[in-house]
Amino acid sequence: MRIILLGSPGAGKGTQAKFLCEHYGIPQISTGDMLRAAVQANSPLGQHVQAIMASGALVPDELMIDLVKQRILDADCQKGFLLDGFPRTLPQAQALKDAGIDLDAVIEIQVADEVIIQRLSGRRVHPASGRVYHQDFHPAKISGIDDETGEPLIQRVDDQADTVRHRLSVYHQQTTPLIAYYLDLAALQTEKSPQFFSIDGSQTVDQVRAALIDVLGVL
């Protein structure tokens, strides 16, 4: 099973990606992890990546495609893989196709922006332990106070409503053309066209999980 999983920040993509990888016995391929591994291995490709990153420049799409192509040759990808964080843009998706990397499914976990904002902006964290609370869904016994230590909880900058709105805006700018691209590919219904599915991510974790298994079961 070769999958791309799309979803805005806070849509629950990480939770469902982990489940799908365990369920199908496939690795989650993170472009960030691949970049770090290439650098650590000190391969020619890794040395090139390190030089680019050290200069502060973005790693070119062509190089990212080379990393993906190299990674999916590994033994753990024989049953497939789940791409995490790539492609992010239309040129990256086109480059993936041009490189002959076939996909079975592209799945979007769709959640309304206002639901995302409520999910993320309500989170509070105990910095020392990493314990996470939510003002609506999992509140602390005393508002703003960690249950176990009595220490103050904080709201991370990334979880502030204005920051979340900005992250969502960037996500939509990048991903809307990507979704249109994969919808058009799916409509071609050729042997190498991935199927496109949209899942309601406002449901419970178990309901989303069941919906994913349901749509992937038809492949």
Image: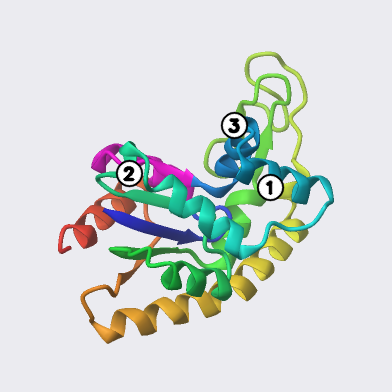
Residue 95 - label: none
Q: At x 42% / y 71%, what residue is drawn?
A: 97
Q: Is residue 53 left or right of residue 112?
A: right
Mark found first going from the N terminus, 1 or 2: 1
Residue 41 - label: 3
Q: At x 49% / y 60%, what residue is drawn?
A: 7
Q: Which residue is mark 2?
A: 77
Residue count near mark 3 (Cα–Cα under 10 Å), binned few <14, some 14–19, many ≥20: few
Residue, far left = 218
Q: CA distance from mark 1 to mark 2?
A: 23 Å
Q: Quadrant of residue 151?
A: top right
Q: Position of residue 189 (x, y in %)?
A: 23, 82
Q: Position of residue 47 (x, y in %)?
A: 69, 41
Residue count near mark 1 (Cα–Cα under 10 Å), binned few <14, some 14–19, many ≥20: many
Q: Quadrant of the C terminus?
A: bottom left
**Residue 152 or 36: which is nearer the viewer?**
36
Q: Position of residue 11 (x, y in %)?
A: 50, 55
Residue, far top = 149
Mark found first going from the N terminus, 1 or 3: 3
Residue 113 visible in the shown view: yes
What stretch of residues is rendered in magenta? 12-29
Q: Residue flagged by tag 3: what amino acid is it?
A: Ala
Q: CA distance from mark 1 to mark 3?
A: 11 Å
Q: Residue flagged by tag 2: what amino acid is it?
A: Cys
Q: Which residue is mark 1?
A: 49
Say if the magenta span includes residue 208.
no
